[in-house]
Image (tube, grey):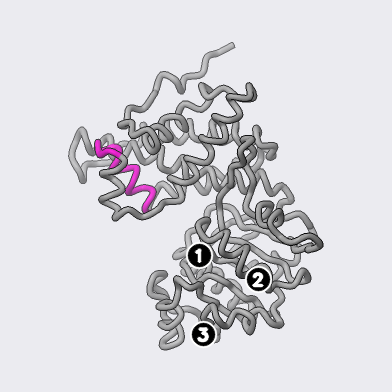
């Protein structure tokens, strides 16, 4: 039995507790400063109010002030934070994690540098560590929703990191009969693939709103336009993965993650509202102004590619769907899918 400490009691961080517990590990769940109500609820009755599941028996809940106690003696630290918590996790959590303990992030996203470079979060965190530190920061990618993982449905993911032996050890700790784990040392390829899906999930779900604009809310869904946008998304995602130096095989994880994301959640709601004809501001008001991963990653990817275009390294005409969703978000354009720009010609 090992000790696994999860920092971040959101839905995915908490869902990871299920395979960890099923493998008979001691699981410690630490809430961030935003998770106080969740941790209090778990302390009282073991029920997670946002995941809407009872956590496995034996999970030990901690408030963030108890972080030191929860990390002491741990064999693995899992970062259960969203991309908006990366800076906080880097500043507040990593300093108390010894270099001997690997870190595994559920976080998906990329940071764009002024020169157009796209940096995956494990690399970004390592860059911000003090000199002399040698912490191994790994990440999880692939299609896996938190509630289905908590329901123990078959899910296939990839753990990526720099050291194959550490990845092998992490796989051994967390793989179960339903949680299937691939491993990869291509961090930039995996992380780019699974981050891009948030941007392109927004693009695909525009088609849902467009058909509702024509035929009314609640009409039968039209799958041809969704499939066409899905295909264009895969084409552009593949090109971006290659552009940043990732292996082409990682599109498998991005495609799977894109598939699962377009079926629900806030990104689908936003894309649907935009497709119905609402402006970006109107749609965000409907969603009560929440910050979405899809909005952030679209902005970062587009900003990076425009910088690379300025340097003569890319042509934005190769990414018409990304350009359009970025125009919707940041230039307040209305939805008008550039279908003709997607067409490829026989050579």
Regarding mark 2 in the picture, which secondary structure is present there? strand
Q: Over which residues does the magenta segment extend? A: 265-279
Magenta segment main secondary structure: helix
Reading the image, the residue beneath label 1 is 12
User: How many numbered circles are shown?
Assistant: 3
Other-residue count near label 3 (Cα within 10 Å), few / some / many at <14 / 14–19 / ≥20:
few
Figure check: 343 above or below 178: above
Q: Quadrant of residue 105?
A: bottom right
Secondary structure beneath disc 3?
A: loop
Judging by the rendered image, the residue that carries numbered circle 3 is 57
Q: Taking 195 as reference, is 54 above or below it?
A: below
Query: Is 198 placed left or right of 107 in the picture?
Result: left
- The image quadrant where one finds the N terminus is bottom right
Q: Which residue is mark 2?
A: 77
SS for callout 1: helix
The nearer-to-camera label among 3 and 2 is 2
Q: Does residue 237 belong to the magenta stretch?
A: no
Residue 301, given in percent of the width and then of the height, sits at 53, 38
Q: Residue at x 62, y 81 (%)?
A: 70
Would residue 182 be visible to someone looking at this image? no
Q: Could you tell whether 207 is left or right of 1 in the image?
A: left
């Amino acid at each position: 039995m090992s000790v696994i400490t999860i920092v971040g009691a959101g839905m995915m961080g908490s869902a990871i507790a299920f395979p960890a517990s099923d493998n008979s590990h001691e699981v410690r769940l630490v809430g961030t400063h935003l998770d106080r109500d969740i941790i209090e609820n778990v302390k009282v009755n073991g029920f997670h109010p946002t995941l809407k599941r009872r956590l496995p028996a034996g999970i030990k809940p901690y408030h963030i002030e108890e972080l030191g106690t929860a990390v002491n003696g741990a064999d693995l630290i899992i970062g259960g934070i969203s991309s908006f918590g990366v800076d906080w996790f880097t500043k507040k959590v990593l300093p108390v994690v010894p270099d001997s303990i690997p870190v595994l992030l559920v976080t998906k996203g990329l940071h764009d540098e002024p020169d157009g470079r796209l940096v995956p979060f494990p690399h970004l965190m390592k860059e911000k560590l003090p000199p002399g530190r040698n912490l191994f920061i790994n990440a999880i990618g692939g299609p896996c929703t938190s509630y289905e993982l908590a329901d123990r449905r078959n899910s296939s993911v990839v753990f990526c990191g720099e050291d194959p032996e550490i990845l092998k050890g992490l796989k051994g700790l967390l793989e179960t009969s339903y949680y299937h784990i691939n491993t990869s040392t291509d961090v930039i390829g995996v992380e780019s693939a699974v981050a891009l899906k948030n941007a392109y999930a927004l693009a695909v779900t525009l088609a849902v709103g467009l058909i509702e604009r024509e035929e009314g809310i609640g009409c039968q869904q039209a799958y041809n336009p969704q499939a066409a946008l899905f295909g264009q998304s895969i084409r552009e995602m593949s090109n971006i993965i290659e552009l940043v130096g990732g292996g082409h095989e990682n599109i498998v994880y991005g495609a799977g993650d894109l598939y699962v994301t377009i079926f629900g959640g806030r990104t689908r709601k936003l894309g649907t509202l935009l497709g119905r004809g609402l402006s970006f501001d109107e749609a965000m008001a409907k969603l009560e102004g929440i910050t979405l991963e899809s909005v952030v990653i679209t902005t970062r990817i587009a900003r990076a590619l425009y910088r690379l275009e300025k340097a003569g390294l890319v042509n934005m005409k190769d990414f018409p769907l990304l350009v359009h969703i970025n125009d919707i978000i940041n230039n307040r354009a209305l939805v008008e899918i550039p279908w003709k720009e997607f067409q490829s010609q026989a050579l």
